Image (cartoon, helix red, strand yellow):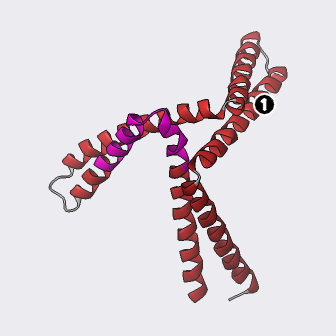
Amino acid sequence: MTIESRSGIAHLNTLGIVLIVLGFAGVLMPAVAGSAVVIAIGIILLLAGIVAIVRVRGAETTIEKTISLVLGVVTALAGIAVIARPLFGLAFLTLLLVGYFLTEGICKIVVSFRYRPANGWVWLLASGLLSFLLGALIWGQWPVSGMWAVGILVGVNLLGTGLALVTLASTLKRL
C-alpha cells in the first residue's frame, strides 16, 4: 500500500467522522440544520440571479436580454427573500418534501403491485408505504414540521453517508 492511498483512506475516514458529527448535530438541532440548508439554497439562488443579470450584456437579441434580466432579477430576489426569511423558506421547502414523499410513496405502491409475483415485491410496497406515511406525517404537522423535517432528514442523510465512508475506509485499510 502506498503512502498516497493510506493518506486517502485517512481522509475518507476523517470526512466520514465529520459527517457523522454533523449528522448528529442535524438530528439533535433540526431547526438549525434546516435553516442552514435554506440559507445555502438562498445563497445559490442569489448567485444564480446575479449570473443571469450579468449574462444580459452578452445576449444578442432584445428578447434574450429581457428574459435573462427578468429571470435574473426574480431569482436574485427569491434568494434574498429566502436569506432574509429562512423560516418561510423552510416552510416552503417542507411543502416540497411533502409533495415528493407522497408522490414517491404512491408511485412505489403502484409499481410494487406490478412486481407482485416476484419475491421481494413486499419490500417495495413497504418502502412506498413508508414514504407515503412520512409525507402524510410531515403534512399533518405543517407548518410546524418545517422546524424539524428538513433538518432531521439532512441529519440522517449525513449520518448515513458518514457511516458508509467510515466503513469503506475501514474495509480499504484491511485490504
Residue 20 visible, this orientation: yes
Q: Residues within 10 Å of mark 1 (few under 14, many from 20)?
A: some
Q: Quadrant of residue 43?
A: top right
- Left or right: residue 119 versus residue 49 is left
Query: Percent x, y for residue 37?
Result: 63, 44
Residue at the spot 50% in from the left edge and 50% down from the top edge: 153
Which residue occupies the foreground of this view, 88 or 144?
A: 144
Query: Percent x, y for residue 164?
Result: 53, 69
User: Residue placed farthest to the top in the image?
Assistant: 62
Query: Percent x, y for residue 174?
Result: 57, 88
Residue 175 visible, this orientation: no
Which residue occupies the foreground of this view, 66 or 110?
A: 110
Q: Quadrant of the C terminus?
A: bottom right
Figure check: 135 above or below 171: above
Which residue occupies the foreground of this view, 86 or 6?
A: 86
Count of labels in the image: 1
Which residue occupies the foreground of this view, 139 or 165?
A: 139
Residue 155 falls within the magenta-colored stretch: no
User: In this figure, which residue is indicated by the disc labeled 1?
Assistant: 51
Query: Percent x, y for residue 94?
Result: 50, 37
Figure check: 111 above or below 56: below
Q: Quadrant of residue 21?
A: bottom right
- Left or right: residue 115 versus residue 23 is left
Figure check: 156 above or below 15: above
Residue at the spot 70% in from the left edge and 16% down from the top edge: 67
Q: Quadrant of the N terminus?
A: bottom right
User: Residue placed farthest to the left in the image?
Assistant: 117
Q: Main secondary structure of the magenta part?
A: helix
- Secondary structure beneath dot 1 equals helix
Amino acid of disc 1: Val
Which range is magenta?
A: 129-151
